[in-house]
Image (cartoon, rainbow, N blue to C red):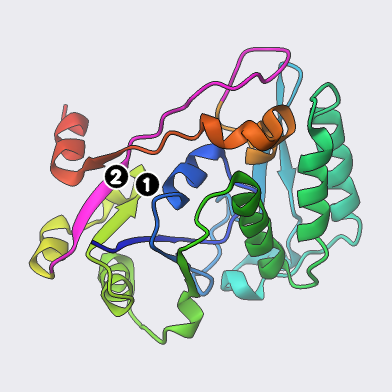
Amino acid sequence: MTTVVITQPMLFPWPGFFEQLALADVYVYLDDAQFSKGSFTNRVQVKIGDQIKWMTIPLAGGGTYKPIMDLEATAADWRATHQLLLKQSLAAASHAQDAIDILDKAYEQDRLCEALIQGIELTANHLGIGKSRKITHSSKLNIAGSSWKRVLDIVLSVGGTRYLTGHGAARYMDHEAFEASGVTIEYMDYSLTPWPQGGGAFTPYVSVLDLIGHAGRDAHRYLKPRTTHWREFLAKQAP
């Protein structure tokens, strides 16, 4: 069985994403997808005490009508702003420098999309996950189409027999079409495992850099990947 995960490049996503990434045999960066305002492509939440703040990359033209691989930032100092915000967030964290080093290394990339991708890859390396997975980009596959049909064609093109996805895909996925093509769909069953986060109520819905800053090299211990077959998942969603 070959497990495929396909997601858009994102800014240091939450730990649940890395539970998904840890199960991938093939990981596809959907870098030619059109940017969607309000997505997690260019922003992520960080926790400062008991407050949640957004760490956001300002985009030229708001990113409107551009594929993610062509996005450009507007402000020259957004990298320094992010570093300062992360330092504030992890001021009392034992391994804050680990997280800051990852951010700084990723931000050495000139192109915004490459910085997003590097952030994910550096984080995965720190967590010790996904070392044997095959990595590709949708822009290199020359596969047209949209919605679930394009997803299926991408999965088949890389030899996938199992497609692992997040919960939002349930709104548009044709599960029977995947099965007819020899591909099973499973949804993530995120563990939401608490880590020692510092002051305020715990939340898992912040950047993975928070987990690394507080747990360091033990961060991978808080990732507990689980999946649910699509039929069981949909049954649980039914009213």
Question: Vertical placement of 196 versus 100: above or below?
Answer: above
Q: Which mark is residue 187?
A: 2
Image location (x, y in percent) of residue 226: 33, 37
Q: Which quadrant, please, contains the N terminus? A: bottom left
The answer to the question of whether label 1 and label 2 lie on touching residues, with beta carbons closer than 8 A, is yes
Mark 1 and mark 2 lie on one chain; the one further toward the N terminus is 1
Report the span colored magenta.
182-203
**Where in the figure is residue 219, as x and y percent of width and height?**
61, 34
Residue 221: assigned label:
none
> In whole angstroms, how far apart are the C-alphas of marks 1 and 2?
6 Å
Q: Mark yes or no: residue 49 visible.
A: yes
Question: Residue shown at 48%/74% (left/top)?
Answer: 136
Q: Quadrant of residue 144?
A: bottom left
Residue depicted at 27% across the width and 76% down the height? 153
Characterize the local packing of mark 1: few (<14), some (14-19) or many (20 or more) Cα atoms within 10 angstroms. Answer: some
188 relative position to 236: left or right: right
Quadrant of the rendered image containing residue 119? bottom right
Q: Is residue 199 magenta?
A: yes
Residue at far top of view: 200
Of 17 and 40, nearer the camera is 17
Residue 237 falls within the magenta-colored stretch: no
Residue 166: which disc? 1
Q: Secondary structure at mark 2?
A: strand
Task: Name which residue lies at 22% across and 54% down.
Answer: 185
Taking the spot 52% from the left edge, 50% from the top edge, the residue there is 129
Q: Nearer the viewer, residue 225 or 10?
A: 225
Amino acid carrying mark 1 in the image: Gly
